Image: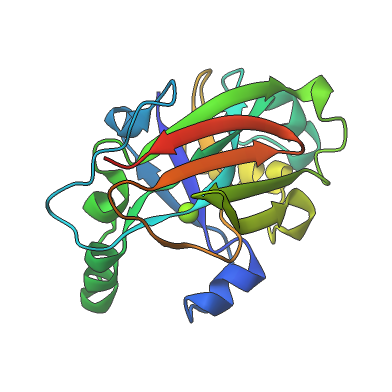
Amino acid sequence: MKIICIGRNYADHIRELNNSTPASPVFFLKPDTALLIRNRPFYYPPFSANIHYEAELVLKICKTGKNIQERFAHTYYDEIGIGLDMTARDLQDDAKTKGLPWAVAKGFDQSAPIGRFLPKPQLPDVKNITFHLCLNGITVQQGNSGMMIQGFDDIIASISTFMTIRTGDLIFTGTPAGVGPVKVGDKLEAWIEGEKLLSCLIK
Ligand code: MG
């Protein structure tokens, strides 16, 4: 399986990092070894001094497709969850400055904690899903799928023109404003609507 991530998909987050709004979606990948499941702890890696959390809605792909039309895209995912696009911001800033890929800044081991997924029927209006992230009990990020520049169907249609998506693939759909650093001892908890789906201790 692969993890496809979209960057710069919420206007308020683009502003906070002083990025420009892309004309077409920014995609990047994480390897399957990035996954961190079952609320296991995240171990602060020694190669970075500035690890950031980014809470994102995550789509679970349920069938194989290529060149998917936007109007059929909704049939290609059947569960929605919440995940953390853990980012070595120092390595990413260095890569951006040099025009180099983000592979290690975004794809290191444990850089993709994911929580429990909800079946789509439980979230009938996919254009109005609220989610939030707490750091040590304080809300630091709040988002709604209606705030995304590229919606779920648009993302699936766009990415599938370049690469086949397959059952089990995950799509991280971008983060709203409020990203920030973590330190050892922090606890991250994430909700979709009123349901807590993810908990992650930084060790
Ligand atoms: Mg992200």
- Residue at the image position 75 percent from the left and 59 percent from the top: 147
Direction from residue 150 to residue 94 in the image, left or right: left
Instruction: Classify residue 88 by image quadrant.
Output: bottom left
Q: x%, y% of residue 63?
A: 60, 17
Depth check: give the residue in front, 43 or 63: 43
User: In the figure, 22 relative to 69: above or below?
Assistant: below
Q: x%, y% of residue 69?
A: 72, 38
* The N terminus lies in quadrant: top left
User: In the figure, 93 relative to 160: above or below?
Assistant: below
Q: x%, y% of residue 45?
A: 18, 46
- Residue at the image position 34 percent from the left and 54 percent from the top: 87
* The C terminus lies in quadrant: top left
Direction from residue 82 to residue 109 in the image, left or right: left
Direction from residue 123 to residue 77 in the image, left or right: left
- Residue at the image position 22 percent from the left and 63 percent from the top: 91
User: In the figure, 22 relative to 110: above or below?
Assistant: below
Could you tell me if residue 22 is visible in this image? no
Depth check: give the residue in front, 144 or 75: 144
- Residue at the image position 36 percent from the left and 29 percent from the top: 36
Instruction: Classify residue 52 by image quadrant.
Output: bottom left
